[in-house]
Amino acid sequence: MVWSGSWVAERLGVELTGDGELHELLGLALRRNPKRAHLLVSNVLGKHVPQRPSVVYGAGYALGRRVHALLGEAGSRRAVVLGYAETATGLGHAVADGLGTAPYLHSTRRPVEGVATAGGFEESHSHATSHLLLPEDPELLASGADDPEAALVLVDDEFSTGNTVLNTIRDLHARHPRKRYVIVALVDMRAPADRERFTAFAREIGARIDLVARGTGTVALPDGVLEKGRALVAEREAAAPDPSAAPDPLAAAGPASAPAPTAETHHPAPPAATRVDLRWPAGVPDGGRHGFTPAHRALLEPALPAMADRVAQALGEGPCRGGRVLVLGFEELMYAPLRLGTALEERVTAEVRYSTTTRSPVLAVDDPGYAIRTRLVFPAHDDPADGPGERYAYNVAGAGFDAVVLVVDSTADTPALHAPGGLLHQLAAHTPHVLLAVVPSYTPSSARTTPPTPEEPSTMLPEPLRGPAFSSYAPDEVGWLLQDLSDTELEAPTEEREEAIQSGGAHYAESLPVEYQPSARYQELFASALDLSAARVARAVGTVTETVLAERGRRPVLVSLARAGTPVGVLMRRWALHRHSLDLPHYAVSIVRGRGIDANALRWLAAHHNPADVVFVDGWTGKGAITRELAAAIAEFEEADGTEGFDPEIAVLADPGGCVRTYGTREDFLIPSACLNSTVSGLISRTVLRADLVGPDDFHGAKFYRELAGSDVSGHFLDTVAARFDEVAATVDADVKELLTADRAPTWEGWAAVERISEEYGIHDVNLVKPGVGETTRVLLRRVPWKILAKRGAGADLEHIRLLAEQRGVPVEEVDDLPYTCVGLIHPRYTRGATGADGKAVESR
């Protein structure tokens, strides 16, 4: 076989000599770096060269067992393991696993506000030099400093000079002197002079320094190799420039390059990646950036098989049985995707490989004697502290992978990841299946003094729930910031709920109504209404979406108010993708009248997105109660939490009440998604807020009615409306042009009408007056209705209202001068004794 370092060796005269497996462990490549031209490319690290996950993990674990044998059982229990970003974060973690009981920390180039720096050092030969140490437990690196058997174990992928390790020990020894250090690497390539420096340094600080490596050797560099390397890189790039790459950010002559040109003008719309809900275990950090303890390991290990099963299910039979699958990690996030890969490898017959993206720019040469055959170039997608730049994935393009499972932390799950020209788009050009798995980014509380334990779980909020595990929507359509209460009995008869609510004995959000099962006749009405109104709904969707994009920027974060707002949010996301190739983030959150919005959901949004980018979305306005509720709740949250920037304005499909300034229409018309409950909303219930189910650190709850899948029309509704987008595009453009120059200030005429009706009908409670087609439908489906007021002459928009009223024995009263198409009145003095336990016998006015 051709050695993957022969191309460089022949052209530059670089020689690798060492033990028998050295050429199997290492290849060579070239990089444009003012300090070192060549790059030692590991075949077992899982960074640049896709390798079997079991081989990558096994290499680190075996080194950890060797360290365990060196230190003994007692010494291993008192050791602390430190890995290096970015290439050795996963290797160091595997070494810590091999030790068995050692806590693990890796350096990072991602600063975290509020987390004190426990040290830092420079990597002199690297393209990105500064390392930070940010342990959640400030005593982690100091623990055992006075114990002669408590070693600090430092792990890197390879030692060329040893300067990085010496810089680290020098910095940490000045803070917390130790008697013992152990250096671990896959290969030790130091020259004799460098080895002598280590010996002298150990004597200088009065400590023992051991070294454990899988392979040893030396690199012989001829005179002028740096200049020759630069010339060769320039020659190759001039001969075959990479069409996907922007100028190299580490050109020898100058500073970092500007970001790549905006992808929207250079790339077609990217296909959507399939999201996989891993259900990452709560309380487990995404890696060792802030420390990873044996207690965390005990939580992660039993969760790995189920996470791998979810990935396998999303991959499907083809890739799992006979294909090639790549699990691709993200820069410093190496351990989580590696362990996911090892678990997947055990559960499928496919050939599973593992590698990660990187900051390091390396020349690609398609030659079997060169270690980096291909490269993908894409913009950074985690808003790095050092500014925008290019990132790379090597040996992925052209490798024949049937599927790529990209694993990122939630900090990196940004619009840039999904944008045209972004990483997901680049991957889709080289594999038929791209899956995205997001691990929640762990941000420690600055008030904590010890890492979380199973007895004291972290307050880290979980990742959003996604379909198909929660809801029938595709996983990329919406992330639900809710907790799954599907196994909890929450339903109560409508009449019992109404009596409890009106007597003050319960809040409406503490239970759920029994899901209404539509009759065959009602389902026919829904289908007819959808056919008649699909273009009208599509026009309103386009109008509200274009208004949001014009006024809130091109990258809004859609946050729908569950559940009526969720189908609208999905349609707005589809419009942005269809018309502008914008893959907008979309989440659903709970808001409860009288209780406010889910504060934990807001905290999650603030941690993962700029609050100023959040646009709240709902289906329609009635009298504007939720509009006012949201404004008050946001103000209360920002004052209590200290987070600022959320805009409480709601964007709605229809605003017949004149309550908002961002809307698709102010007409009160039938939105078919209002006709049904969960079966048009992804099979999700309305949200639940009850003290015994929802704790102070929990999201509000909801149920997933999997058993109603046979009646589910959620996808049909979305597809039917989206199919009319092109038809209404020109009309939408005209509508938006007119709206953007019009006076859209809220008039609140709906609220005034509700107050008038409440007094005129002797109700004296505006909460029992539900104006508009959507709200009237809800009254008939969920509450005990008293009567329906219908605008005289209203036609097809009220057919389903009349049918529901007939089925429940509710009178429909035709009235003039009604600002809405209809208004539903909840029975104002409801008791089962007064009206009949079945709720059908109603008093007339």
Image: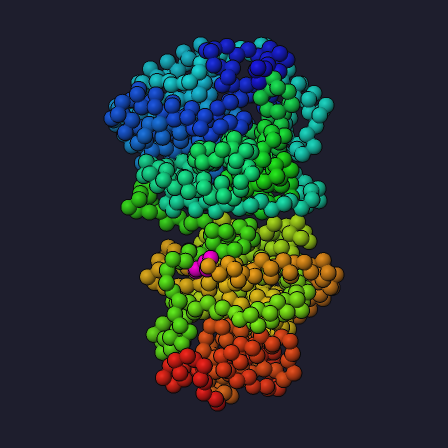
Please provide the residue range marked out in magenta: 702-706
Residue 257 left/right relative to 196: right
The colour style of the image is rainbow
Residue 53 rendering spot, x and y as whole percentages: 47, 30
Residue at the spot x=30%, y=31% of the render? 101
Residue 90 rendering spot, x and y as whole percentages: 44, 31
- Count how many numbered circles sit on residues in the image: 0
- Relative to the observer, which residue lies in front, 514 or 430? 514
Residue at the spot x=42%, y=13% of the render? 195
- Relative to the observer, which residue lies in front, 680 or 396? 680
- Most extreme residue toward the front, as rendered? 520
Quarter of the image where the N terminus is located: top right
- Most extreme residue toward the bottom, as rendered? 845
Residue 619 rendering spot, x and y as whole percentages: 56, 66
Relative to 638, residue 788 above or below: below
Is 387 a magenta residue? no
Residue at the spot x=60%, y=77% of the render? 798
Residue 373 left/right relative to 442: right
Residue 815 left/right relative to 189: right
Residue 718 visible (yes or no):
yes
Name the image quarter holding residue 620.
bottom right
- Relative to the observer, which residue lies in front, 50 or 453? 50
Name the image quarter holding residue 572.
bottom right
Residue at the spot x=66%, y=18% of the render? 232
Relative to 445, residue 340 above or below: above
Residue 662 rendering spot, x and y as whole percentages: 61, 65
Residue 250 visible (yes or no):
no
- Magenta-drawn stretch, dominant element (helix, strand or loop): loop
